[in-house]
Image (spheres, grey):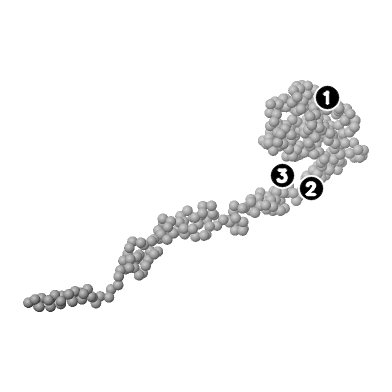
């Protein structure tokens, strides 16, 4: 019996290893992404491990919802709905080879008065009428426009300062400019046969004390005078200043010359004097009207103050000191003086027209 049991145990031990053997050839499982729509799909995976990726650029937008386009909001073709930059951004709207932020707007026509050599884009501001008289520069005719001059040109559209008032060429000054720093700083060379003896700080009282000697030396045909502002700023009264002015004008007219008075300016730097300026100018305008007769106005007045106010009295009419005229301011003076001198019947000139003339 013992022998039989031993044999049975031995047979059982021999069969245990055989129980682990199998004829199944299947391989081990391969974990990974098994979704073919995912960016990291693995065709060899046999079991999905949850690693599938659907946002290739990790911007929080699933690939299926991505929109390609320009994402720079400074570009011309910025696309607000774009989620992925596709390199299509355009920064040269007119395709002229100059990036928009480098463009310079201006007049690109070299024939225009305001041609801007730096301009890359035409802005339609080109100006072909420099003096704004309604006549294109190419059609302008330069010449003397004063009908009282010896060389008056009825076809001229622009006065070139060539008017001759000295027919016998005897050397007498046709134009004499006297007065304060506004005269001194004025380039009066466009007025042929002119002399400018203005000087800074001059007052009417100074002009009166020297006027006899000046008239004898220059024997002018026409005198342009600026005085009064310095007198009033030195606390002389309007009455005192006007009396000196009257005396000066009477002496000039007595010599046979005519006179143009350039009125006071509404300077930003002397607003506290403007009321006195206006009072002074009003007296001179009344004086000019009373001097005129039916055929001749020996004194005419350019109402500078109202003329400047009519155009808004911008600071650009004055230098930085807010007292003296700038080149722009003098351009108006040149224009108004030429205009009033062309109108022998005008007594008071304001802006672009004669406001009071001989009746």
Mark 1 residue element:
helix
* Mark 3 residue element: loop
The local crowd at label 2, few if under 14, some if 14 to 19, many if 20 or more residues have their Cα within 10 Å, is: some
User: Residue at coordinates 39% horizontally, 64% vertically from top-left?
Assistant: 40
Contact (Cβ within 8 Å) of mark 1 with mark 2: no
Check residue 141 in the rendering and tell me which mark sits there, or answer none. 2
Residue 194: give x, y in percent of width and height: 85, 37
> How many angstroms separate mark 1 from mark 2 (CA)?
41 Å
Question: Label 1 belongs to which residue?
Answer: 247
Q: Which structural element holds mark 2?
A: loop
Q: Quadrant of the C terminus?
A: top right
Earlier sequence position, callout 3 versus callout 1: 3
Nearest to N terminus: mark 1 or mark 2: 2
Can I make out residue 260 in this image? no
Location of residue 313 (image quadrant): top right
Locate the N terminus and report the quarter of the image it occupies. bottom left
Can I make out residue 273 in this image?
yes
- How many marks the image carries: the answer is 3
Q: Residue at x 90, y 30 (%)?
A: 216
Tell me if 131 is positioned left or right of 39 in this view.
right
Looking at the picture, how far across and down is residue 102, in whole percent?
A: 61, 53
Of tags 1 and 2, which is closer to the observer? Answer: 1
| Percent position of residue 190, x then y | 81, 41
Q: Identify residue for label 3.
A: 132
């Amino acid at each position: 019996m013992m022998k039989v049991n031993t044999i049975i145990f031995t047979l059982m031990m021999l069969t245990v290893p055989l129980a682990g053997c199998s004829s199944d050839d299947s391989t081990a499982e391969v974990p990974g992404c098994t979704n073919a729509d995912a960016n990291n799909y693995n065709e060899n995976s046999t079991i999905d491990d949850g690693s599938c990726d659907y946002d290739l650029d990790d911007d929080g937008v699933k690939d299926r919802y991505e929109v390609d386009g320009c994402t720079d909001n400074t570009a011309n073709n910025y696309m607000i709905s774009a989620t992925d930059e596709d390199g299509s951004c355009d920064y040269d709207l007119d395709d002229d080879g100059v990036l928009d932020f480098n463009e310079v707007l201006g007049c690109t026509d070299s024939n225009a008065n305001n041609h801007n050599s730096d301009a890359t884009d035409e802005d339609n501001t080109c100006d072909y009428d420099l003096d704004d008289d309604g006549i294109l520069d190419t059609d302008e005719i330069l010449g003397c426009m004063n009908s009282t001059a010896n060389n008056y040109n009825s076809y001229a559209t622009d006065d070139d300062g060539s008017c001759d008032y000295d027919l016998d060429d005897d050397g007498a000054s046709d134009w004499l400019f006297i007065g304060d720093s506004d005269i001194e700083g004025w380039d009066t060379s466009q007025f042929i046969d002119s002399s400018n003896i203005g000087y800074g700080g001059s007052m009417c009282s100074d002009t009166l004390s020297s006027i006899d000697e000046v008239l004898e030396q220059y024997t002018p045909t026409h005198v342009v005078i600026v005085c009064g502002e310095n007198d009033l700023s030195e606390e002389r009264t309007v009455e005192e200043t006007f009396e000196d002015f009257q005396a000066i004008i009477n002496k000039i007219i007595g010599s046979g010359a005519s006179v143009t008075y350039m009125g006071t300016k509404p300077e930003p730097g002397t607003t506290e004097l403007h009321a006195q300026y206006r009072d002074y100018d009003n007296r001179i305008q009344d004086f000019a009207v009373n001097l005129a007769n039916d055929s001749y106005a020996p004194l005419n007045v350019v109402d500078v103050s109202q003329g400047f106010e009519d155009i808004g009295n911008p600071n650009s009419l004055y230098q930085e000191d807010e007292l003296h005229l700038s080149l722009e301011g003098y351009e108006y003076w040149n224009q108004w003086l030429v205009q009033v001198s062309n109108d022998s019947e005008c007594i008071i000139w304001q802006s672009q027209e004669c406001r009071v003339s001989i009746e």
